[in-house]
């Protein structure tokens, strides 16, 4: 089976061998591609729409080789007019991020809607939001998809696809650097023009939970409530239960929501577990959790930061320094050269798929990080650009009563 990440990254034989040390992560990243781009039964979320969203997302990130790959897949499914419309939308959508409280792009509010169709235009609005400002997601943004004909299950699959690409493109670039390439810098993108209020509205099926949102990053647990209805426990089949990996997760609304696409959930979970819990060599658990916390702090995901700061401390991280990261943000002094380098790498991989460079890789090696550890750092940072985008865009955090 072709490994798309190896193919796009031109990973060296040495780096491919390092990836095999995390074989569950490698195999399930590829299975994530299969589940999201080429499922056996695509349902209403057609192959054409999946390839169009992937091509658009890679192009707005300016990941040219990946964009060419996904446009090739699209051209095998779509007519010339649609391909041209996707290319035009992609050029309009090139931007930078992450940011918060910025303008929204509306790909379906002009003649573009006629060329793309209402569903795909709304999907591109959503993909642009996930790529560059997931913190701005809301029940109204979910309502925009619902009004365009996206079912609850397809909203989950669409979100998984765009979030997976945020991971894939970052890993691809990181592997190129780790393999010894120094990829040419991408042209600096300006924030794409848009409108401050797109006029989206929540629909009758959009959930608007009554929660108390955190007003800062916290070092205690948080709850989370969805904007899309989770799968009911009574509707779980053996396939859905198997996708949870841990059966007790059926009590979590988050996992019941993602179980609407069980193949994607299972592959994603197994990727996650190998990246963070395979401790045969490489980066320590505390260091991986630090990278996850830095990425979550940058993306603005209070829920993920609350979970992974705690795991970092449980695995031996310094409580005072982790609290400093939560309080002061991504520029905080983390007290040691090693943690400062982890912070810098996680920030670079979160800022853009391409900000991690040969100079930073050299700094990591000079500080004693071996290549397996650098791969773990790329994986952990990139994975939380997947995880954050699901948590931020499919629901909202809730401060438990005992902490209010």
Image: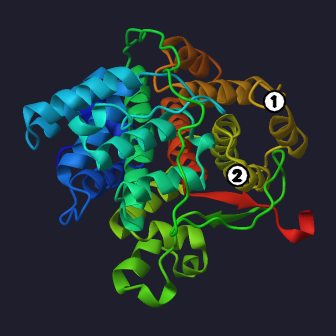
**257 vs 387: above or below:** below
Q: Position of residue 136 (x, y in %)?
A: 61, 41
Label 2: few (<14), some (14–19) or many (≥20) C-alpha neighbours in 10 Å: many
Q: Secondary structure at mark 1?
A: loop
Q: Position of residue 216 (x, y in %)?
A: 83, 45
Residue that carries the numbered disc 1 in the rendered image: 334
Q: Residue at x 46, y 21 (%)?
A: 354
Q: Nearer the viewer, mark 1 or mark 2?
A: 2
Q: Is residue 51 left or right of residue 198?
A: left
Label 1: few (<14), some (14–19) or many (≥20) C-alpha neighbours in 10 Å: many
| Residue 305 visible in rendering | yes
Q: Position of residue 308 (x, y in %)?
A: 70, 52
Q: Residue at x 11, y 41 (%)?
A: 78
Which one is nearer the viewer's eye here, 18 or 379?
379
Which one is nearer the viewer's eye here, 136 or 252?
136
Q: Is residue 202 left or right of residue 220?
A: left
Q: Position of residue 358 (x, y in %)?
A: 48, 14
Q: Residue at x 33, y 66 (%)?
A: 263
| Residue 276 visible in rendering | no
Q: Secondary structure at mark 2?
A: helix
Answer with the quarter of the image where residue 58 lies. Answer: top left
Residue that carries the numbered disc 2 in the rendered image: 308
**293 vs 105: above or below:** below
Q: CA distance from mark 1 to mark 2?
A: 16 Å
**231 vs 112: above or below:** below
Which one is nearer the viewer's eye here, 81 or 29?
81
Q: How many marks?
A: 2
């Amino acid at each position: 089976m072709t490994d798309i990440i190896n193919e796009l990254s031109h990973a060296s034989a040495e780096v491919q061998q390092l990836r095999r040390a995390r074989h569950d992560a490698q195999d399930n990243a590829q299975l994530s591609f299969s589940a999201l781009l080429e499922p056996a039964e695509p349902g209403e979320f057609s192959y054409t729409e999946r390839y169009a969203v992937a091509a658009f997302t890679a192009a707005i990130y300016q990941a040219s080789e990946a964009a060419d790959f996904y446009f090739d897949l699209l051209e095998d499914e779509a007519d010339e007019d649609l391909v041209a419309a996707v290319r035009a939308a992609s050029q309009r959508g090139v931007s930078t991020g992450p940011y918060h409280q910025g303008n929204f792009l509306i790909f379906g509010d002009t003649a573009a809607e006629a060329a793309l169709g209402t569903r795909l235009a709304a999907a591109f609005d959503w993909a642009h939001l996930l790529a560059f400002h997931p913190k701005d997601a809301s029940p109204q943004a979910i309502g925009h998809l619902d009004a365009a004909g996206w079912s609850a299950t397809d909203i989950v699959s669409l979100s998984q696809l765009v979030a997976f690409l945020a991971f894939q493109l970052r890993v691809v670039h990181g592997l190129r650097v780790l393999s010894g390439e120094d990829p040419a810098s991408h042209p600096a993108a300006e924030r794409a023009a848009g409108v401050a209020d797109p006029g989206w509205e929540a629909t009758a099926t959009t959930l608007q939970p009554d929660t108390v949102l955190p007003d800062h990053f916290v070092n205690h647990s948080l709850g989370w409530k969805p904007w899309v209805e989770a799968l009911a426990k009574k509707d779980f089949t053996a396939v859905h239960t198997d996708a949870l990996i841990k059966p007790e997760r059926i009590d979590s609304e988050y996992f019941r929501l993602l179980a609407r696409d069980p193949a994607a959930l299972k592959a994603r979970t197994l990727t996650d577990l190998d990246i963070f819990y395979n401790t045969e060599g490489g980066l320590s658990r505390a260091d991986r959790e630090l990278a996850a916390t830095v990425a979550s702090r940058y993306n603005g995901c209070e829920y993920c930061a609350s979970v992974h700061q705690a795991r970092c401390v449980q695995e031996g991280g310094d409580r005072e320094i982790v609290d400093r990261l939560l309080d002061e943000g991504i520029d905080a002094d983390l007290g040691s050269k090693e943690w400062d380098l982890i912070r810098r790498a996680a920030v670079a991989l979160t800022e853009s798929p391409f900000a991690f460079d040969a100079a930073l890789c050299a700094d990591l090696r000079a500080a004693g990080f071996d290549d397996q550890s650098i791969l773990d750092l790329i994986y952990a940072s990139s994975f939380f650009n997947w995880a954050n985008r699901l948590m931020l865009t499919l629901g909202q955090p809730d401060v438990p009563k005992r902490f209010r």
